[in-house]
Image (tube, rainbow, N blue to C red):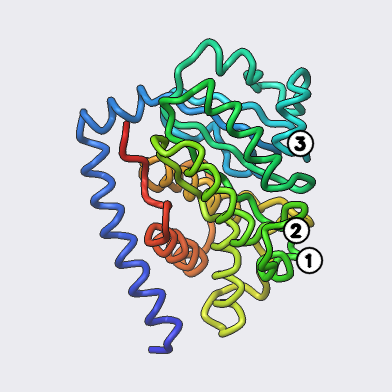
Amino acid sequence: MSCFSAFCFTALCFHALLSSETSAAEKNPDVASKNSSTKIYLIGNSLTWDTVPSKLKGDVQWHVDCGKSLKYIFEHPEEPCVKTSTLWPTALKQTKFDLISFQPHYGTTVQEDLETISKWIELQPQATIIIHTGWAKSASLLEEHQDDSPDGKLTHSPAYFNELLAQLRKAFPDTEFRTTHCMRMLIELESLIKTDDAPFDAVTDIYRDAIHMKNETGRYLMHNAMRETFGQERTTQGFPKISDEQRAILDQLLDQRNTWEAARPATRL
């Protein structure tokens, strides 16, 4: 048996065990009740939309405006590109949310994102906050990841998001913060591909264009990252069929993500 085949067999066995545990959780009425009653809100652009909010469990609403930063969305909430959006001025005033996801994007600084997110947290002080990292354009994936300075305009780098989270925690010491680590998963996938340990030719295989994710691979990965950060079980429902080998690698990345800092599900629900 080749090393890659052995890895796939191990990963598939682990996923089967995870699925059996998930099935047991789904049969637990307390878990089902919590999932269905949890109120969730997401603010971001198409990289939030690529996490497929409509497939999340619970009472889920969103404000998604394509290509826009959080600062822009705060200042111009009137006409987001996704017409099923519940505008944030309405949503955050009318509903008390358990979980809120914010997705910073190109064009802002740490200070601007801090100021914008802080204004929203002040409207929803009880919520657990998820910082959705989004991800870089495929052409600049490694360059952005290697940016070791949080200064200047956003890059999808650990330096930027670590600094943003540190500043948010300082400003809101009683708030629980989590992160999706979606960018980091793409970097890990890139590493696996370079060592021939993944059934993809390049990380662009899970992109559908310069920045967005394919439905059957990239969106599966990003949806489940968001889902598991919210404390919901992994799912294949609603995603096109992909090979067992590809799913094993994507599930390995999700399993790995769950060991990273601030990735585990929110605890205050």
Q: How far, Cα to Cα, is label 1 from label 3? A: 20 Å
Q: How far, Cα to Cα, is label 2 from label 1? A: 5 Å
Looking at the picture, how far across and down is residue 109, in whole percent?
Answer: 73, 47
Reading the chain from its start, which is encountered first: label 1 or label 3? 3
Few, some or many C-alpha atoms within 10 Å of disc 2 (few <14, some 14-19, many ≥20)?
some
At label 1, the amino acid type is Ala
Residue with the most extreme bottom position? 2
In the depicted structure, whether residue 89 falls above or below residue 21 = above
Residue occupying image coordinates x 53% and y 24%:
122
Looking at the picture, how far across and down is residue 32, in whole percent?
Answer: 28, 30
Quadrant containing the N terminus is bottom left
Are the residues flagged by discs 2 and 1 in contact, CB closer than 8 Å? Answer: yes
Q: How far, Cα to Cα, is label 2 from label 3? A: 15 Å
* Quadrant in the rendering for residue 96: top left
Few, some or many C-alpha atoms within 10 Å of disc 1 (few <14, some 14-19, many ≥20)?
few
At label 3, the amino acid type is Cys
**Residue 139 has which mark?**
1
**Image position of 20 (left or right of 155):** left
**Image position of 208 (left or right of 39):** right
Looking at the picture, how far across and down is residue 5, in whole percent?
Answer: 42, 81
**Residue 137 has which mark?**
2
**Image position of 256 (left or right of 139):** left
Residue occupying image coordinates x 42% and y 36%:
175
What element does badge 3 sit on?
loop
Residue with the most extreme top position? 94
Looking at the picture, how far across and down is residue 187, in whole percent?
Answer: 60, 68
Total numbered circles: 3
